[in-house]
Image: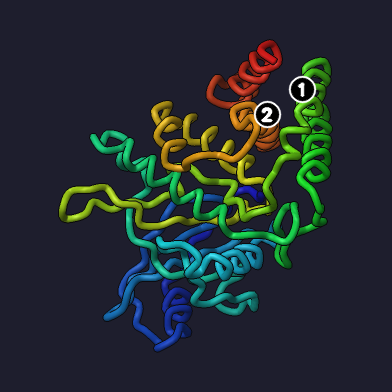
Amino acid sequence: MGHRISFDLDAAAADAIVRGLPGSPTLAGVTPLTGGGSELFRLELQDASPVVLKVYPDAPKWGPRKEVLVAGWMDGALDVPTPRLVRFDESRTLLPLVYAVFTWTAGSDLRSYFSAPDLEDAYRQMGALLRRVHRVPMPAYGYILDEGVSDPKPTNAIYMAGAIEGALRKFRSLGGDVGLARELEQILQGGMDLMAESAGPVLCHDDFHPGNLLFVREEAGRLRLSGLIDFGNARAGDALMDLAKALFCSKHEDPRSSVPLMEGYGPIDHSDPDRALWLYTLFHRVTMWNWLTALGADPGSPTGPGGLLRDLHEMARAS
């Protein structure tokens, strides 16, 4: 993923973008939003629902078209809203960067409700939704780029062997301990039979955490899942790989999340799901250390690279 950009949206440009949307609506206001490596703006429209303007950095070049592609796959695929594409513009005539306009998805991210008394129920809804995402089949295993699955692999074992080799090669190149890398490689290769049990490639969100799940408080008082956003990391892979990433990221933000999220996800048809999830979590910790280290994060941070290294050492000892 690219580094976050900083972009000031000119009022005249925002007005021109809105007038070019279906029905030629009138701009009523602009509100900057936060999230990801792109710049986001909520555009208020007169006599119409708001929309979201997403302005993309120049790198990766395939990023905008990938998001448009996956948004199309998800349009109507779930029983909760996902952002639907309204306009996509690569011309750089109204803005100096590529942009897309998506429908507005109502709600606040789950982080806003961490003190709510019914938070556990919200996590169960998250788990159930992830299960539904995993019902979207894919033709092969691999990372998704702008034209679909890139370098598709026929089995999860082949795909994960390459992913593991690439992750540990990067780990070493970024200064990771060579001895630890050797231990992790042996552990992951030793668990390849469990990863080979994959039931088939499915759509994996790969960024399923409280910041990308939207909720609303209903009139009756229940906290209800109202939307899923940000498919920029999507890949085609084993459902358990994605579930492990969701548990890993959600637990990092809130240790209370794991049990209810798993309850919501439901039964797993696998000979040893706990061990498979453990192996995938190890892999995700390596890739997260790589990503944060490449971004220049404090190597000793207990909530960043330092904490991940501590966890990797503990996992190696426990294996």
Instruction: Determine which quarter of the picture holds residue 274.
Output: top right
In the drawing, does residue 316 fall left or right of residue 75?
Answer: right
Which residue is at the far bottom?
23
**Residue that appears at 51% across and 72% down:** 85
**Residue that appears at 77% across and 22% down:** 187
Q: Which amino acid does label 1 sit on?
A: Ile
Which of the labelled discs sits on residue 129, or is there none?
Answer: none
Residue 223 is situated, as x and y percent measured from the top left of the image, at: 27, 47
Q: Is residue 236 above or below residue 286?
A: below
Question: Label 2 belongs to which residue?
Answer: 279
Secondary structure beneath label 2: helix
Q: Quadrant of the C terminus?
A: top right
Residue 136 is situated, as x and y percent measured from the top left of the image, at: 58, 59
Which residue is at the far top?
317
Q: Is residue 37 above or below residue 268?
A: below
Q: Which amino acid does label 2 sit on?
A: Leu
Question: Label 1 belongs to which residue?
Answer: 187
Colour basis: rainbow
The answer to whether one can see residue 108 in this image is yes
Residue 29 is situated, as x and y percent measured from the top left of the image, at: 32, 70
In the drawing, does residue 213 fall left or right of residue 77?
Answer: left
Which residue is at the far left?
220
Q: How far apart are marks 1 and 2 (CA)?
A: 8 Å
Q: In this view, does 66 lie above or below 177?
A: below
Q: Is residue 180 above or below residue 224?
A: above
Q: Tell me, yes or no, whether the two marked residues, 1 and 2, touch with CB atoms within 8 Å.
A: yes
Residue 276 is situated, as x and y percent measured from the top left of the image, at: 65, 31
In the drawing, does residue 72 fall left or right of residue 65?
Answer: left
Q: Earlier in the sequence, mark 1 or mark 2?
A: 1
Secondary structure beneath label 1: helix
